Image (spheres, rainbow, N blue to C red):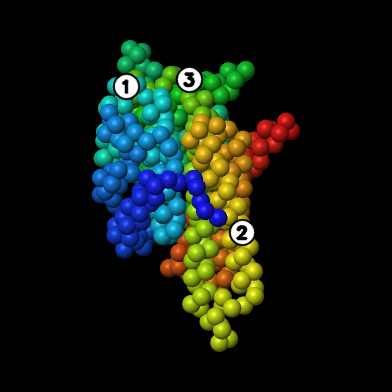
Amino acid sequence: MRRTVFNEDHEAFRRTIRDFIEAEVAPQYSQWAEQGFVPREFYKKLGELGVFGIEVPEEYGGAGEASFKFNAVITEECARAGVSFGGSSVHTALCLPYLLKYGTEEQRRRWLPSFVAGELMTAIAMTEPGAGSDLAGMQTTAKLSEDGTHYVLNGAKTFITGGVQADRVLVCCRTSPPTPEDRRSGISILVVDTTTEGYAVGRTLDKLGLKTSDTAELSFTDVKVPVSDLLGEEGKAFGYLTHNLPQERLGIAVSAYAQAAAAVRFAHEYVKERTVFGREVASFQNTKFVLADCRTDVDAMQAVVDRALEAHDAGELTAADAASAKLFTTETAARVIDKCLQLHGGYGYMMEYPIARLYADTRVTRIYGGTSEVMRSIVAKSMGL
């Protein structure tokens, strides 16, 4: 079926990204995965390409595009090639919406030009060792100084993608205790300069997949953060976090679909080349049926993702819609990629094959951005259950 979600501009951008990946990413991707991060200079190349400025208004050096579809193109092309752009997706898809919506004019002028150029990389720190998905249970605190000029930040965060190389981290913290009536109140976002005394990067975490995304533990010991680096209003951040979740979950859904589509492509190519018992693996009925099932699942995932992309661009993507899309695509992608790895036989278990990397990378899509169990709860609640 002809896909209609992307226009000529999107497809021209797709060709640019595909050429960029072939020239700048694929040749050294194995080395990046082995070292656990992409070179910092690579982010500047993405800046030069315009990747970081797509949704940034022109007055701050960006292109001023409102559509999320350009981000979807990047996700699809990375999955198609079996690569990633390191922690850059957090920089653009997670951090940028907060800076654009809640940043003051002074903050946007101070941060966004360097953001667009890849000279100032960002990450967001929500999760804590003892809280997990329970954001209202966070213990990191920021107390306003007596003279009112700065906050004093103390606490720890974990699973922070991009946390090793970030220049600014959007730290979610408690600026006041929760109330008995509302345990979500009192949470704020501070945009912390990572060179500040008392800010420390702990362990770089050794993950199952997403090997080129630096993921770290962070700690804060009496870190002084100027009040001018408070993002939005004090104590209102839980609502901010909730507001951005549909886009975050849409991005994960796009990624899951793209990974599954890539897995089918890799498996199709492999079974056409591989022979067993004197025959192409592709010639066996089981292979044909498995790939037919996978292709059908991918077609269904594409329909869900495309509908969600259109709804998001129209400002109509609800929290339940995004949860449903994430739940369906991530759970389906897991089954599809597992089947495609099986068709590779023993070679599918070798990390030199992209199907193995996809298998490892896709597992976390059912965890981050809200677990599948949380997604089911959201959808059920929307049904009045």
Callout 1: SS: helix
Residue located 39% across and 18% down the image: 144
Query: What amino acid type is highlighted by mark number 3?
Result: Gly
In the depicted structure, whether residue 170 falls above or below residue 35: above
**Looking at this view, is 239 or 195 the one in front?**
239
- Between disc 2 and disc 3, whose residue precedes? 3
On the image, numbered disc 3 is attached to which residue? 235
Callout 2: SS: helix
Callout 3: SS: loop
Horizontal relation, residue 169 to residue 333: left or right = left
Residue 105 disc label? 1
Circle 2: is it few (<14), some (14-19), or many (20+) Cα within 10 Å? Answer: few
Q: Residue 369: horizontal and vertical position, in percent? A: 53, 41
Kindly report the distance in space between the C-alpha atoms of the residues bearing marks 2 and 3: 46 Å
Q: Residue 8: horizontal and vertical position, in percent? A: 39, 47
Q: In the displayed orientation, state which residue is furthest to the right.
A: 385
Indicate the quadrant where residue 378 lies: top right
Q: Residue 289: horizontal and vertical position, in percent? A: 64, 69
Residue located 51% across and 51% down the image: 3
Residue located 49% across and 70% down the image: 269
Kindly report the distance in space between the C-alpha atoms of the residues bearing marks 1 and 3: 20 Å
Residue located 52% across and 68% down the image: 267
Q: Are marks 2 and 3 in contact (CB under 8 Å)?
A: no
Indicate the quadrant where residue 375 lies: top right
On the image, numbered disc 2 is attached to which residue? 296
In the depicted structure, whether residue 149 falls above or below residue 264: above
* Residue mark closest to the camera, 1 vs 2: 2
Query: What amino acid type is highlighted by mark number 2?
Result: Thr
- Residue 375 shows in the view: yes
Q: In the displayed orientation, state which residue is furthest to the bottom.
A: 278
Query: What amino acid type is highlighted by mark number 1?
Result: Glu
